[in-house]
Each structure stands twice: as structure tokens, then as C-alpha cells.
Image (tube, rainbow, N blue to C red):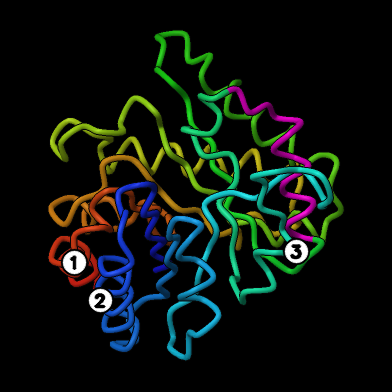
Amino acid sequence: MLIVANWKAYVETLEKAKRLYAAGKRIAAAGHHDIVLAPPAPYLGLLASANRSNVEFASQDVSETLGGAATGEMTAAAVASVKAAYAIIGHSERRALGESDAEILEKVRHALAHGLTPILCIGERERDPEASYLAFLRKQIQSVYEPLSPKERAAIVLAYEPIWAIGKSAADAITPTDLNEMVLYLRKVLGEYLKSPGKARILYGGSVEPGNARALAAGSGIEGFLVGRASTDTQAFGALAKALN
């Protein structure tokens, strides 16, 4: 399992960032899962550049810009220079701020050009009886995959995060059966762009907790999770990883 801990803006002190990093190292040392930590930008360079463990790091976003006069932006080159390996791109919270498919494509291109593995987030806001949300997901995939080369497409990790499931309890979130059906659909769409869609790494994000992680992982076809708030609680994150062993 690839478990990506998206700390978002929950972590506001270096002390807490260091505690979470230490917890991530302990989980990674067990050898059961690949652990990727995505701290807020101020802590990414501090932790990633000095990292000598099995843990890997991701940026929570990258900029469209290649550098220059762009105050506040974080380029893919800067992220790669501190030895991060991944970049989360197109997260629902970024899309909610107005980020377009075209902007997301540029970010993916910049990440790939600097040796970062993009974690491309897609997900529907709601489900309708006519299943038009499936076409919506197809468009999100198409807008990024279609312009890329076969080699670039194969490097992307796809993270499915249904927006309607975020923030709910495990009992009210997506069911293992529904997740399995979605993964089958996503692989079908990816088959239009990849020679081996079965090898594409698909993660799930959306109210992932220790209580439902094992059931969601079993037989659904996912290869891991994009975990939000639960990843900033050392006990909850450790229990989640243990449940997947």
C-alpha cells in the first residue's frame, strides 16, 4: 500500500511536524507500506532535505510558473531540489478555489519535467441518478492524460477523492462495493491512455479511518490511500497503517 499523509494546514508548529515525521518513520520502518508525507510548505524543505529514512515526501501543490517574478509560488524545481519525490496536484480543495483543468495539466507537466511523481486528484462533488458524474470524472482524466506522452501518463498516480464523502464518518462514506465499481470504471477510462491500465496506481481519499481502511482496501483494486486529517494524529495514523498490514 502507498499511504500518502496530506497534513494540509492542520500542522502549524515545527514541533508537531517533527512528531508526525517520527511516527511516519516508525511505520515505514516496519516495511509493510510505502509512506509519503505531505507537510505544509515551511516544513517540507526542513524535513525532506535531511531525510535519511524510508519515508518519502510530497508537496501539497506546485505552481504553474517556472520561476521568476511570482511572489508566493512554489515551483516544481524548488520542490525537487529539497528531495521531495511526489507532488499532490488537483486536490479538491485547490479546485474549489478555482483551479482549472488546464492549470492542473500545466502543474502535472512541470512536476514530471523535474522528476516528481504527480498524485493527480479527481472526484465528483455529488452523485446523480443519471450517473453523469461518470462523464465528469472521465473529463478530469482526459484533460490531463490526453495531451501527455505515453511515458508521462504511466508515471502518474491517480487519487480518487469523491468530494461528497469527505468529512463524513466511516459508516456514511463510500462502501467497499461502490469503491470497487469506481476503480473498475477508472481503469476502463485509463485504458484509453495506457497500455497497461491494470498497473496504474490508484489511491482512495475521502473519510479514511482505521475502522474502514481495511474493508476499503480488500478487493477494491486500490493500491493505497490519500489520508487527510487522520494522518495528523499519530495514534490514528498508526492504527490505520496497522489495519492494512
Q: Which of marks 2 and 1 is nearer the N terminus?
A: 2
| Residues at marks 2 and 1 touching, judged by CB atoms closer than 8 Å | yes
Q: In which quarter of the image is the N terminus?
A: bottom left
Q: Could you tell me which secondary element the residue under label 3 belongs to?
A: helix
The reply to whether the magenta stretch includes residue 110 is yes
| Residue drawn at x 40%, y 72% as measured from the top left | 35
Count of marks overlaid on the render: 3
Which dot, 3 or 1, sits closer to the camera?
A: 3
Q: Is 76 included in the stretch rendered in magenta?
A: no
Q: Whole-percent x and y of residue 22?
A: 28, 80
Q: What residue type is labelled 2?
A: Ala
- Where does the image place residue 107, in percent across and percent down from the top left? 72, 46
Q: Which mark is residue 234?
A: 1
Question: Pointer 3: residues within 10 angstroms few (<14), some, or many (20+)?
Answer: some
C-alpha separation, residue under disc 3 versus residue under disc 1: 31 Å
Marking on residue 77: 3
Disc 2 and disc 1: Cα gap in Å? 6 Å
Q: Where is residue 2 in the image (x, y as percent from the top left)?
A: 43, 67
**In which quadrant of the rendered view does residue 180 lie?**
top left
The amino acid type found where label 1 is placed reads: Thr
- Identify the magenta region: 98-112
User: Which residue is identified by label 2?
Assistant: 23
